[in-house]
Image (spheres, helix red, strand yellow):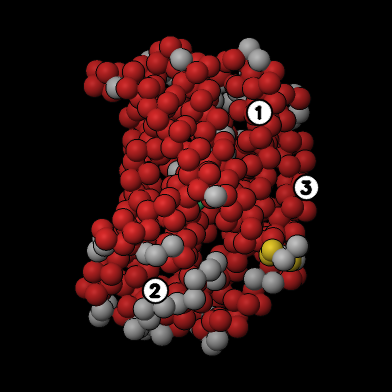
Amino acid sequence: MTRETWATRAGFILAAAGSAVGLGNIWRFPWVTADNGGSAFLLVYLGIVLLVGVPGLLGEFVIGRGGKKSPVGALRDLSGSSAWGLWGVFYVVTAIALISFYSVVGGWILRYFGESALGLAGARPAYFAAPGQYFGGAAAGLDALGFHLLFLGLTALVVYAGVRRGIELGTKVMMPAVLALLVGLAVWAGTRPGAAEAYAFYLSFDLETVRANFFDVLAPAAGQALFTLSLGAGTMITYASYIDEDRSLPFDGTVIAVLNTLVGVLAGLVVFPLLFSLGVDPSQTAPGPGALFVGLAGAFSQLPAGALVATAFFGVVVLAALSSSISMLEIPVSFLVDEYGLSRRRAVALVTGAVVVTGGVCAINPTIAGTAVFGFVAGPLVDTLLTAGLTAVLIFVGWVMGRDAVAEFRSGAGGFSAALATPWLLATGVALPIFLLFTLLTTFG
Ligand code: PHE
Ligand code: NA
């Protein structure tokens, strides 16, 4: 059986951008930012996106396009060492950890979308009455479990349909819809009273705070930067493995990083004016995963056409989340297909079955040894796995592939970007791994 490929170049870019743009931009970003001192965090985060994110993205692309297999097969074949193949399994595990909590949040979102849409039919969305209490119920027990299964089921359907007919076709529809709706919402939010204050809050950088907190925000900022670009999980290796023809990886990588940042900024331009227009100070709302659902959901309830705005907003988030969750599920699926010759159908069934359980635990969210599972998986665990995962990718590119990585980088690239190949390799093999290992140490130290 020949391996699947993307049908078009735009297909690859949209699928990868679809993976990057997700809950990370809209849901995780505000609460991680709020937890880590706001604007100080933002600046460090943007710096890491640019200086580590883009070269890292290219590292994963080079491995994926060069190896033409799932992370396990690509790392093994390119290095000729089964130890690297074994390390590839690390990405499969990371992907399972990711989708386990992601699908739970996806479920909450799906529920809020459904509730809001009911509002279009005349019924008042249930969460309008008491947002805090409503979220408490939605995020617990069988409610959370049920919607987790629903969201996971949707994800599995898309992945089951295949690289071209599922992922590519799906993201081709989802991504433009996300962009168009967000631009519309941001323009509308800009007309709300309090928008000017919101922009000032959101876009003002306080250099002094950055300096004072630099080392405290380094690890969470790096974690968030990797998370938002889908780095360190093997996603971008997997997606790049389906590239058929020659194309400029630096160009594609830049487009993807810019699109992802644009959506993040746009999301802020929607969220903050809405909160400010109702006199909610975002830095005063309780930090944590519920921030968006409680603060923003409460804001919707007080708007003139609240149900309509909420439907558009949660619609955006559902699409963004789905185009990311499929990219997580695809990693273990491609591993089973490539390594064990399983049919896509079987592979999807197996992986989905596993995530029913692991995600179910995140949904129920028991406290083990004094730590609530959900917050641990969604925060420190995933951050650490992604940082370790990307560090290994960079070391592999710099020290195992070396000159081959430069050749892969240059192939299909035009003049300017080809000239960047050697500086990129140096940064990738030396500076960035040191930086990432350092941030890992600050997490534990
Ligand atoms: N980038 C996605 C987001 O921002 C999350 C993601 C992480 C997807 C890692 C795939 C791999 O929501
Ligand atoms: Na993202």
Instruction: Work out how far the residue at label 2 is from the one at label 3, CA to CA, in angstroms.
Output: 40 Å
Residues at circles 2 and 1 in contact by the CB criterion of under 8 Å = no
Residue type at mark 3 is Gly
What is the crowding at mark 3: few (fewer than 14 residues within 10 Å), some, or many (at least 20)? Answer: few
98 or 184: nearer the eye? 98
Image coordinates for residue 99, horizontal then vertical, percent: 63, 49
Identify the mark nearer the N-term, 3 or 1. Answer: 1
147 or 37: nearer the eye? 37
Q: Above or below — where is 191 with respect to 206? A: below
Q: Quadrant of residue 339?
A: top right
Can residue 375 be seen?
A: yes
Under circle 3, the secondary element is helix
Q: Which residue is mark 2?
A: 283
Q: Quadrant of the N terminus?
A: top right
Instruction: Work out how far the residue at label 2 is from the one at label 1, CA to CA, in angstroms.
Output: 41 Å
Instruction: Work out how far the residue at label 3 is from the one at label 1, CA to CA, in angstroms.
Output: 23 Å
Q: Which residue is mark 3?
A: 353
Residue type at mark 2 is Ser
Give me the disc on residue 87: 1
